[in-house]
Image (cartoon, grey):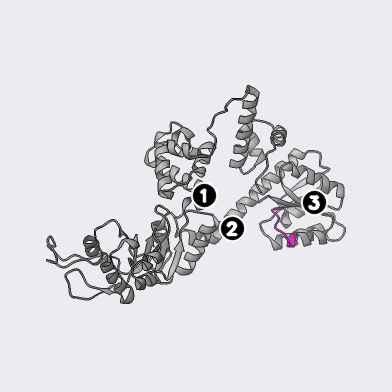
């Protein structure tokens, strides 16, 4: 979404001049010639920044400033005033203005620099406000990353259900982070100080899984030399995560149903009824409704497990979260492998985002671990990635093909600037510093190559 800036000045020529300056930096603008129009625009839209002339025909500029600040404490406000009017500038700053620009506007570069600085400050204020509102909640979810709408919806659902001792069924492909999500639910619940135990129901033979879950009495089978507690006893008071629940046998499903119904069970080979207080979170990558229809999964157990269902999206369905995971895994494996890797090249990241990720987050973690291990610099490059990811990508290889030297330079420069601006969120000042070129030259190249700030 484009950055929106509201320009307020009773001189149409000044509004037009400021709008033209801001359009070169791809900002979206609206103008108002008086205070009442400005208030109406402000209350009916979301602006990131306000350029406010204090000398308006209908409303005192300082009163308008207070109204803006009372409505939105985080909006950026820059006042416009003559350089000689120092007392008014000082008073406006005290009333909540973030900065000022002086009339007449003779230096567009200086104006843009001030605007970019205040937008950066606003972004920091917004982030701090968001983190402050979420800190208690998010601290319970240290491993399940994501900012995409579907993940945010899952966070909101967890907030609602975490404190309720009801069963939860997680449905999603292998490697999507279902166990991390189950652990997040546990950490947000009243059981957080108790055990969280995870078991893969598809990874053990039926008899071994049964004795692991319910325990066994001495002499129950060959090798049972002593009575052993099962996971349902070990997890008492806590949470038990049953992964690949669809792989369980009909006989085991009967025993699981009883625990869910009345919280009781017997050890293998035993006759004593044992009571347990365990919250069950289960997961599957199968269509359990189809399994019920095919008589391979008990319908009554399915409805017991399926009180709350969370569909965990695949990585390709939340590809905008991929950079978060990449950063997380780079930090983890750079520390683990004692490597200086800190970053990933934009082209390498583009290949990762274009890949279809059949193994989801688990596969991505393995790829980043490999790339960190192979990297010879502080940045993961395309050649550090596995060949199958490069070959499967619809992106062109990082070559210039059959081009003249002039064309090759232009191709490289356009791609370089596009990646640089994207990585810096179109911070022109920072981009000009990194690229080592004056800001006016950078603006000229943006226009030359038709680069646009994403909307």
Disc 3 designates what residue? 87
Q: Looking at the image, is 289 positioned above or below residue 6? A: below
Q: Closer to the N terminus: mark 2 or mark 3?
A: 3
**Observer-nearest residue: 10 or 66?**
10
Examine the image and state in which quarter residue 420 appears: top right
> Badge 3: few (under 14), some or many (20 or more) residues near its Cα, within 10 Å?
few
Counting other residues with Cα less than 10 Å from the Cα at mark 2, is it few (<14), some (14-19), or many (20 or more)? few
Tell which circle, 1 or 3, labels the residue nearer the N-terminal end. 3
Disc number at residue 319?
A: 1
Say if residue 162 shows up in the picture.
Answer: no
Question: Which residues make up the magenta segment?
Answer: 42-49
In the figure, is residue 19 to the left or right of 395? right
Question: In this view, which residue lies farthest toward the front?
Answer: 294
Residue 139 visible from this viewpoint: yes
Q: Is residue 353 above or below residue 58?
A: above
**Mark 2 or 3: the one toward you:** 2
Q: Position of residue 221 (x, y in %)?
A: 13, 64
Per the model, the C-alpha gap separating discs 1 and 3 is: 52 Å
Decide whether residue 292 is among the magenta residues.
no
Find disc 2 in the rendering and name its residue: 129
- Magenta segment, prevailing SS (helix, strand or loop): loop
**Mark 1, secondary structure of its residue:** helix
Residue 225's spot in the image, x, y percent?
Answer: 12, 62
**Left or right: where 54 falls relative to 208:** right
Front residue (pair 252, 41): 252
Compute the Cα span from label 2 to label 3: 31 Å
Provide the secondary structure element on which disc 2 rests. Answer: helix
Considering only order in the chain, which callout, 1 or 2, is on the residue closer to the N terminus?
2
In the image, 417: left or right of 279? right
Q: Kindly indicate the quadrant of the structure image that contains residue 71.
A: bottom right
Marks 2/1: CA–CA distance: 26 Å
């Amino acid at each position: 979404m484009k950055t929106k800036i509201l320009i307020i000045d009773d001189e149409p020529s000044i509004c037009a001049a400021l709008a033209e300056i801001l359009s070169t930096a791809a900002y979206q603008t609206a103008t108002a010639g008086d205070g009442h129009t400005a208030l109406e625009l402000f209350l009916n839209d979301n602006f990131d920044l306000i350029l406010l002339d204090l000398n308006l025909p209908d409303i005192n500029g300082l009163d308008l400033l207070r109204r803006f600040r009372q409505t939105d404490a985080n909006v950026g406000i820059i006042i416009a005033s003559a350089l000689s009017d120092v007392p008014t500038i000082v008073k406006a700053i005290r009333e909540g203005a973030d900065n000022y620009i002086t009339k007449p506007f003779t230096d567009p570069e200086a104006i843009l620099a001030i605007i970019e600085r205040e937008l950066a400050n606003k972004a920091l204020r917004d982030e701090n406000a968001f983190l402050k509102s979420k800190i208690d909640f998010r601290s319970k979810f240290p491993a399940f990353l994501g900012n995409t709408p579907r993940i945010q919806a899952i966070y909101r659902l967890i907030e609602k259900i975490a404190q309720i001792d009801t069963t939860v069924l997680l449905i999603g492909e292998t490697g999507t982070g279902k166990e991390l999500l189950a652990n997040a639910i546990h950490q947000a619940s009243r059981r957080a100080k108790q055990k969280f135990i995870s078991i893969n129901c598809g990874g053990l033979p039926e008899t071994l899984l049964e004795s692991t879950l319910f325990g066994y009495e001495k002499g129950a089978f060959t090798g049972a030399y002593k009575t052993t507690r099962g996971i349902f006893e070990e997890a008492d008071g806590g949470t038990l995560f049953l992964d690949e629940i669809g792989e369980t046998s009909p006989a085991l499903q009967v025993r699981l149903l009883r625990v869910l119904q009345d919280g009781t069970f017997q050890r293998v080979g035993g006759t004593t009824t044992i009571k347990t207080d365990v919250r069950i979170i289960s997961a599957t990558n199968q269509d359990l409704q189809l399994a019920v229809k095919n008589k391979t999964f008990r319908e009554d157990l399915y409805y017991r497990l399926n009180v709350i269902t969370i569909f965990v999206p695949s990585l390709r369905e939340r590809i905008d979260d991929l950079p978060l995971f990449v950063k997380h895994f780079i930090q983890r494996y750079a520390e683990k492998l004692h490597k200086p890797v800190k970053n990933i090249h934009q082209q390498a990241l583009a290949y990762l985002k274009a890949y279809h990720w059949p193994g989801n987050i688990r596969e991505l973690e393995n790829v980043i671990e490999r790339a960190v291990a192979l990297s010879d610099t502080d940045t993961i490059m395309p050649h550090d990635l596995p060949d199958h990811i490069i070959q499967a990508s619809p992106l062109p290889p990082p070559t210039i093909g059959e081009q003249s030297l002039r064309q090759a330079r232009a191709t490289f420069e356009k791609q370089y600037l596009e990646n640089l601006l994207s990585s810096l969120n179109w911070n022109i000042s920072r981009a000009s510093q990194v690229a080592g070129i004056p800001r006016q030259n950078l603006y000229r190249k943006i226009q030359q190559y038709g680069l646009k700030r994403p909307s």
